[in-house]
Amino acid sequence: MVDMRNDRAIAGPAILFLCLGNICRSPLAEGAARAAFARAGIDATLDSAGTGDWHIGHAPDARAQAEARRRGVDISALRGRQLRRADFYDFDLILAADASNLRDARAIRPTDATAELKLMLDLLPERGGQGVTDPYYGEDDGFAETWDDVDAVAAALVAEFSPSSG
């Protein structure tokens, strides 16, 4: 089980995962990435945020936590936060879950921002331009589908930032 409580600022890529409320897709993406980077032995700063403010300070949705736990990852210590202007300087890469999140992020992105901003699934050639399905209003199996998507994104990130890749 990978534990999310041992967070620290470190050298390496800094990646922020972004969705609407920061309780489903982006914490699942953060958890999948933390697990994948840890398995690969790659240091990275990983975080997640939402474009909305409804869930600031809240733990991830119980169904998201259950799916992550089923995959061997504990995301229960994560807490929702809202995207802020400083994120565009603090992170190298901001990955949005869908086109709406990307549009909202672009709307507040400072003109001199240093972070690259794109869709999560743009990292998967066969899925470029698509959004990660939002499981919030659906059935529990939607969280498994979301995990599969974000886990594939995490694997692509590990391949991109692996010392042997570059």
Image (tube, grey):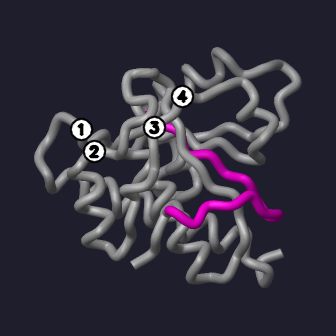
Q: Residue at x 31, y 73 (%)?
A: 71
Position of 93 relative to 157 (above/below):
above
Residue 92 coordinates in the image, percent (x, y): 77, 47
Disc 1 crowd rating (10 Å Cα; few below 14, some 14-19, many 20+) is some
Say which amino acid is labelled 2: Asp
Determine the residue located farthest toward the top in the rendered image. Answer: 107
Q: Residue at x 56, y 82 (%)?
A: 39
Which residue is tagged 3? 80
Q: Are marks 1 and 3 in contact (CB under 8 Å)?
A: no
Magenta segment main secondary structure: loop
Residue 152 coordinates in the image, percent (x, y): 46, 65
Residue 9's disc number = none
Q: Are marks 3 and 4 in contact (CB under 8 Å)?
A: yes
Position of 47 relative to 163 (above/below):
above
Disc 2 crowd rating (10 Å Cα; few below 14, some 14-19, many 20+) is some
Which residue is tagged 4? 82
Q: Are marks 2 and 1 in contact (CB under 8 Å)?
A: yes
Which residue is tagged 1? 136
Residue 61's disc number = 2
Residue 6 coordinates in the image, percent (x, y): 57, 66
Say which amino acid is labelled 3: Gly
Position of 82 relative to 127 (above/below):
above
The alpha-carbon separation of the residues under discs 2 and 4 comes to 16 Å
Label 4: which secondary element = loop
Say which amino acid is labelled 1: Tyr
